[in-house]
Amino acid sequence: MTKTDRAYLSPVKLLSELIRLDTSNPPGNEEIAVHFIESLLTREGIKSLIVTPEPRRANILARIPGKRPGKPVVLLGHLDVVPANDEGWIEPPFSGAVRDGLIYGRGAIDMKSQVVCHLISFIMLYRSGMVPERDVIFLATADEEVSGKLGAEYMFQKVDDLSDASFVLSEGGFVMEEEGRLHARISVGEKQVCQFMIRATGRGGHGSMPHDDNANDKVVRAAHRIIDAQLPFKLTRIATRYLNGVLKGRKVARIQFSDLKEALLDQGFRRFIEGRPAYNALLKNTVTLTMLKAGDKINVIPMEATAYFDARIFPEVKHERFLRQMARIAGPDVQLTPIQKTFSVPSSFNTPYFTNIAKAVRGVTGPIPVLPDLTTGATDLRHFRARGVTAYGFFPIRLPAEEHMRMHSVNERLSVRSLEEGQECMDEIVRFLATYSFPG
Ligand SMILES: [Zn+2]
């Protein structure tokens, strides 16, 4: 095989193969994907480290040594996917079938495609013989879709210099195609999870004789107050930069958009934002009622009722303070209990990483806006950011808004053209990361 032989490293072929390895989590079974990647690396003469926290769960790490020790660059991806059954799919979710220029399957977007592109760019860097400034690490993990405990979190205990990384690239942002316009969004932070429940107790009784100490009534009323509470718009630097970039020069809700702060003074514009869940979540702390548990018989007044809320708050908000606010709104008839929280610290977007990723993107797509973004869900990147590492979520594939919605849903798929373009851009990004000399 010659050094330039890239034929077997086709991203389309490798993605199809990786999709066919069912790593639905639970149960995970990422080991099969780890062995697949290991065989590709071995074929190139690259050694890999496989870390197995539990039977059939595995993580794989490979490294190209740099000129100087410490501060490695990490290409991070997860190998597990959310479960899927065949129902509603044009091609089965674990077929990796290519049909009409589209690759079908669970993980086509989230995020086996990015793992494949990381791997190919990593191998091409190795083949080039170039010695990077710092170690370049390829890392593919287990368990991201459930807790990360057997994946990224576990790897911090096993690999010392991960927490000392200079930069980490993983999932979160794409090149979005909305109403015929392109913009790239690079996720530089994420909202914090702040989940809680409210619970009421009361007197039981027969449904035929209502009384005013009904646990259900109390929870429903309190839940209503929480849902109806108008949480204010918050202008963070990230959201302002993002929405100014996306909406600039457009006519939105009958105003000519020029600046977010000014536009939010307009009631029609506020309604426009509130009608778009992605924009709304970027500008507000959000609270979503997700589960209700109460009663098990139609003619019995239960003695207890509970409602569960999934709240996502901005990085700078204190969980305790937000929960106190929720408890006040819910009122005295219910008791509020925190369930789960994550902490997050955003990375700066004023970095050479941002500038050069933007340059690589524009090299492929032409002059489009490249904007920082805040992810509303939680990813493995929070573990790195919490350790002070600059970490971005970005994969340079072109995704129309309706294709983006297929993530975690039926007919998750990615166009061949978009994947090939993504690979070209990823090669460029990895070349930059290898040649950039992190100070210190
Ligand atoms: Zn993911």
Image: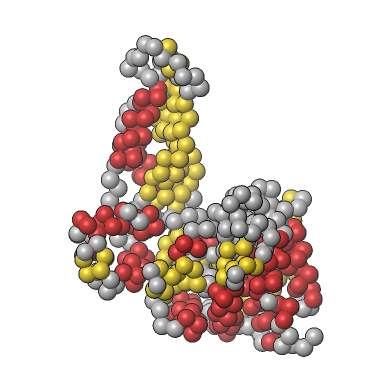
- Visible in this render: residue 84? yes
From this view, report whether residue 189 is shown above or below residue 249.
above
Residue at the location (37% across, 49% down)? 286
Q: What is the x, y in percent for residue 10?
A: 68, 77
From this view, report whether residue 173 is shown above or below residue 82.
below
Q: Nearer the viewer, residue 90 or 150?
A: 90
Q: Nearer the viewer, residue 339 or 39?
A: 39
* Colour scheme employed for the rendering of this structure: secondary structure
Q: What is the x, y in percent for residue 358?
A: 46, 79
- Visible in this render: residue 317? no
Q: Nearer the viewer, residue 138 or 345?
A: 138
Identify the image quadrant of residue 337.
Answer: top left
Residue at the location (78% across, 70% down)? 39
The number of numbered badges drawn on the structure is 0
Identify the image quadrant of residue 57.
Answer: bottom right
> On the rendered structure, is 398 left or right of 32?
left
Identify the image quadrant of residue 324.
Answer: top left
> On the rendered structure, is 185 left or right of 267?
right
Viewport quadrant of the N terminus? bottom right
Q: What is the x, y in percent for residue 85?
A: 64, 49
Residue at the location (24% across, 62% down)? 253
Q: What is the x, y in percent for residue 262?
A: 21, 65
Residue at the location (34% across, 14% down)? 211
From this view, report whether residue 216 is shown above or below residue 100.
above
